[in-house]
Amino acid sequence: MRVVDADGSQLGIMPLNKALDIANERDLDLVKVAPMAKPPVCKIMDYGKYRFEQQKKEKEARKNQKIVNLKEIRLSAAIEEHDITYKAKNADRFLKDGDKVKASIRFRGREITHTENGYEVMKRFAEMLTQPFVIERKPKMEGRFMIMILAPSESK
């Protein structure tokens, strides 16, 4: 196996027991870093310190991630002007906070025969929004529901 020293310098290709002896002399561990390589690559290092550094990097990466929630706004096919304005205002607030908005319309009874009303309501709802957004998913029927997903625009 190919052995790399703690400082990154190559010690060469040697048998496993010789590499383990070198690691034991220095009170360090022999860690296989590239098991699929030909020959496998091992590094002499303090494994506890290595694991600590890896956990620190992962924690830093998680801290820098932005969590995006999906907020749902329910509309109806026969929604009044004031109601849709109020719900659009809420959707604006959600988009401003960086959350995605799922606008849904549930068709009850015979309303299902007039899905074009739902498309019109969705279009009107999208036009009322003042925050920049992108339509992640156009209005589409799923059973008795029509669903549209809006995401905040990245150009801030």
Image: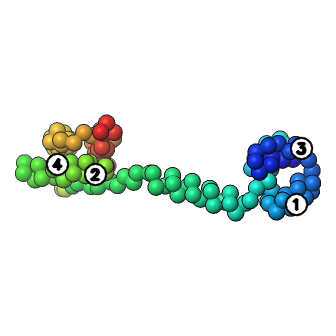
| N-term-proximal mark, 2 vs 3 | 3
| N-term-proximal mark, 3 vs 4 | 3
Residue holding disc 2: 97
Residue 128 in percent (x, y) is at: 15, 42
- Give the amino acid type for the residue marked by disc 3 in the picture: Ile
- Give the amino acid type for the residue marked by disc 2 in the picture: Asp
Q: Residue at x 33, y 54 (%)?
A: 70
Q: CA distance from mark 2 to mark 3?
A: 56 Å
Residue holding disc 4: 88
Q: Quadrant of the C terminus?
A: top left
- 57 vs 136, left or right, is right
Nearer to us of marks 1 and 4 is 1
Q: Secondary structure at mark 3?
A: strand
- On the question of residue 145 being in view, the answer is no
Q: Along the line of sight, which residue is nearer the eye, 52 or 136?
A: 52
Disc 4 packing (10 Å; few <14; some 14–19; many ≥20) = many
The answer to the question of whether label 3 and label 4 lie on touching residues, with beta carbons closer than 8 A, is no
- Give the amino acid type for the residue marked by disc 1 in the picture: Glu
* Relative to 1, residue 72 above or below: below
| N-term-proximal mark, 1 vs 3 | 3
- On the question of residue 153 being in view, the answer is yes
Disc 1 packing (10 Å; few <14; some 14–19; many ≥20) = few
Q: CA distance from mark 2 to mark 4?
A: 14 Å
Disc 2 packing (10 Å; few <14; some 14–19; many ≥20) = few
| N-term-proximal mark, 1 vs 4 | 1
- For residue 25, which numbered disc appears in the image? 1
Residue holding disc 3: 13
Q: CA distance from mark 3 to mark 4?
A: 67 Å
The quadrant holding residue 29 is bottom right
Q: Secondary structure at mark 2?
A: loop
